[in-house]
Amino acid sequence: AQRVTQPEKLLSVFKGAPVELKCNYSYSGSPELFWYVQYSRQRLQLLLRHISRESIKGFTADLNKGETSFHLKKPFAQEEDSAMYYCALSHRSADKLIFGTGTRLQVFP
Amino acid sequence: DSGVTQTPKHLITATGQRVTLRCSPRSGDLSVYWYQQSLDQGLQFLIHYYNGEERAKGNILERFSAQQFPDLHSELNLSSLELGDSALYFCASSPQDRGGTEAFFGQGTRLTVV
C-alpha cells in the first residue's frame, strides 16, 4: 500500500541550527516525491519536488530509494521557516497525491 | 494566491445537518482533489475528479459525496454530520489527471460541527 510516514509531529530548533525533517515512504513502483509547506494562516504550497533536484529557500531533499526516504534538510534554519511541512507521494499513473501527517517546524530566535 | 477558490471559509453547523463546500479550480485545470485535515490525522485524501469524472476515491465516508460540474467547479457534500467531521477541508487542482504534477491548494473551509 502507498504510505508516507513523517515520524516527528514537532521539531523545534534555534535559529542557525541545521534542520532535517524526516520522510519515509512505502510504494512498490517509482514514486514522485514532494515537500509541501503551510505557513501560518496560508494555504499549502509546493516547496520542492525530487525530480527538480533544486534548492528552494535553502531547503534540499534527496530521494534515497534504498532507504525509501526523502528527508528535507536545511543547514541553517531561519525564523521564517517556522511552518507545517508535509511530505507527499505520487506516481505518474496514479490519480492521487498521498500526504504524510506533517511535521511542525518551530524555529526559535 | 494559487488561483483555487474555496467557499465558504468557515462553516458552523449542528450534528445531523448537511452542508456543501465549493471549490473553483485554477483556470485551465481539469483535476480537482479533496482532502480532509484534522488535528491528529494530517491530510487525508478523499476523492479526485478529472473533467467531470470521478477518478479515485480515498477514505471518503458514505455520508460524503462530491461532483464536478461542466464548468469544472466541484462541490463536496457532507450529510448527517457528526462532531468528528469537524475539520479543515481542502481542495486542490492540477492541470492533468495523473500524478507527478504540482497540486495547487485553496485556503480551505473550516467546518465546525456542534
Image (tube, rainbow, N blue to C red):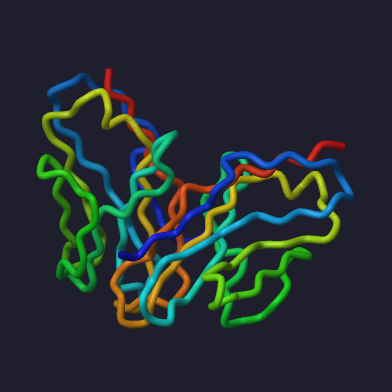
Nearer-the-camera pick, B20 or A99:
A99
Q: Is residue B19 above or below residue A50?
A: above
Residue B42: name its quadrant.
top left
Place of residue B41 in the rendered image (x, y in percent of width and height, measured from the top left): 39, 41
Q: Quadrant of the N terminus of chain B?
A: bottom right
Residue B13: name its quadrant.
top left
Task: Identify which residue is drawn at 47% across, 76% down.
Answer: A32
Residue sitting at the far front: A66
Place of residue B7 in the rendered image (x, y in percent of width and height, measured from the top left): 34, 43
Task: Identify which residue is drawn at 57% across, 41% down.
Answer: A9
Task: Identify which residue is drawn at 32% across, 78% down.
Answer: B98
- Tell how many labels: 0
Q: Is residue A91 above or below residue B4?
A: below
Nearer-the-camera pick, B16 or A24:
A24
Task: Identify which residue is drawn at 80% across, 44% down.
Answer: A79
Nearer-the-camera pick, B112 or A103:
A103
**Left or right relative to B75: residue A43:** right
Q: Is residue B110 above or below residue B13?
A: below
**Left or right relative to B79: residue A88:** right
Place of residue B85 in the rendered image (x, y in percent of width and height, measured from the top left): 26, 32
**Left or right relative to B4: residue B53:** left
Place of residue A92 in the rendered image (x, y in percent of width and height, measured from the top left): 37, 82
Q: Quadrant of the C terminus of chain B?
A: top left
